[in-house]
Amino acid sequence: MSFRDNLQHLRAMRNMTQEQLAMLLGVSRQSVTKWEAEKSYPEMDKLIKICQIFECSLDDLVQGDLTDSAPVPDAKAVPAGPATDVCGYDEHMRRFARRVPAGVAAFVLGVVGLVLFEEGTALRGLFNSGMAASWGEFLGLGALFAGVLVGVGILVSAGMEHSAFVKAHPFIEDFYTDEDRLQARQVLVRGLVAGLMFIMMGILLGNFIEHESGAEAPAGAALLALVALGVWLIVYAGMMYGRMDIDEYNRDAVEELEVEDIARIDVPEAVRAELRSAKRTHKKVEVACGVIMLVSTLVALIWLFMGPSIAGTTWGAIGSGHAAADSPASYFWLPWVVGGILCGIVSIVFKAFDGER
């Protein structure tokens, strides 16, 4: 017999649901579902705890046959009470809400460095004008590259961690109280007000510096630095409030589930039907957006390589910087922007149409 068969039999003997076992083990119900579907395997500490709950040996649980064991009359049950965060959703979302705006702020701060060192403005007191301009350009590009590198690193790692969490916990039972939601609304209001204040302060400070000294680079750097702080606060507050919408999380998580996974998870039939409908909608959006972006890429490539010849502009002129602004090739990226906008519209239309049916 397999571990799956033994676990299912032991649960049946104790009249224990997957959710009850998950709560006893401190994991999500989806983890138990995946164990019994042989999609994943519990860690050693969870195996030991399962043995303690069902009073069996590790060898019998993993390699033996427990299906012939006698039923146990005193089945363990989970006390009735409010739902709890058994899978660490709140802690994960708090960490995610800190990292995403930090990544965005890193991009903006990289631009701050570029603006600050532009044309050697920040170095003119240390070097002559020619050397300051050379070092300024080098340090500015270095700051921009560092900001982009740090921002991409933060966002990619945060995205991968969130994707892994969603795949491990595709369905979360709402455990937030009215008090939790009230606190989240307060955080949202404070974050929006503080963020907008910092952005306004950046605009005022930038104008003041430029008016008093006539230096555009320090003014722009001060503006962008305060804007970066304001953006961090606004995005953080918005994500902290958004984590309360567990229904939205469950709808988004279905994108990571396959149809067979939806058939296996332990949810009411009404929820299962809703998940299947959302999955179908996601598939439609996925196909439509794939076609749109493919067409956009083809148009962009044609625009890039055939645009100069159509406009009568030579590649030599473009490479030397002459007529680059007037060349169609300089706008080859526009089809991707249009494609992205169309994908957003298609997604909204499909979801609205399927939601009305």
Image: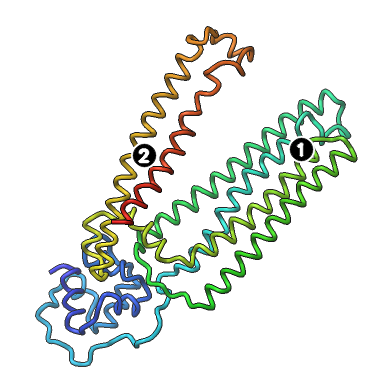
Q: Which residue is mark 1?
A: 116
Q: Nearer the viewer, residue 27 or 191?
A: 191
Numbered-mark total: 2
Residue 293: give x, y in percent of width and height: 39, 34
Left or right: where 139 falls relative to 214: left
- Give SS at disc 2: helix
Q: CA distance from mark 2 to mark 1?
A: 39 Å
Q: Residue at x 18, y 89 (%)?
A: 72
Mark 2 or mark 1: name the one nearer the start of the chain. 1
- Give SS at disc 1: helix
Left or right: where 164 falls relative to 215: left
Q: Nearer the viewer, mark 2 or mark 1?
A: 2
- Tag 2–tag 1 contact (CB < 8 Å): no
**Which label was assigned to residue 180?**
none
Residue extending farthest bottom:
74
**Which label was assigned to residue 289?**
2
The quadrant holding residue 112 is top right
Residue 14: give x, y in percent of width and height: 21, 84
Q: Residue at x 43, y 43 (%)?
A: 344
Q: Residue at x 35, y 61 (%)?
A: 168
Residue 136: give x, y in percent of width and height: 76, 31
Residue extending farthest front:
356
Q: Residues within 10 Å of mark 2 (few under 14, many from 20)?
A: many
Tell me the quadrant of the picture where the N terminus can be found: bottom left
Residue 77: give x, y in percent of width and height: 29, 86
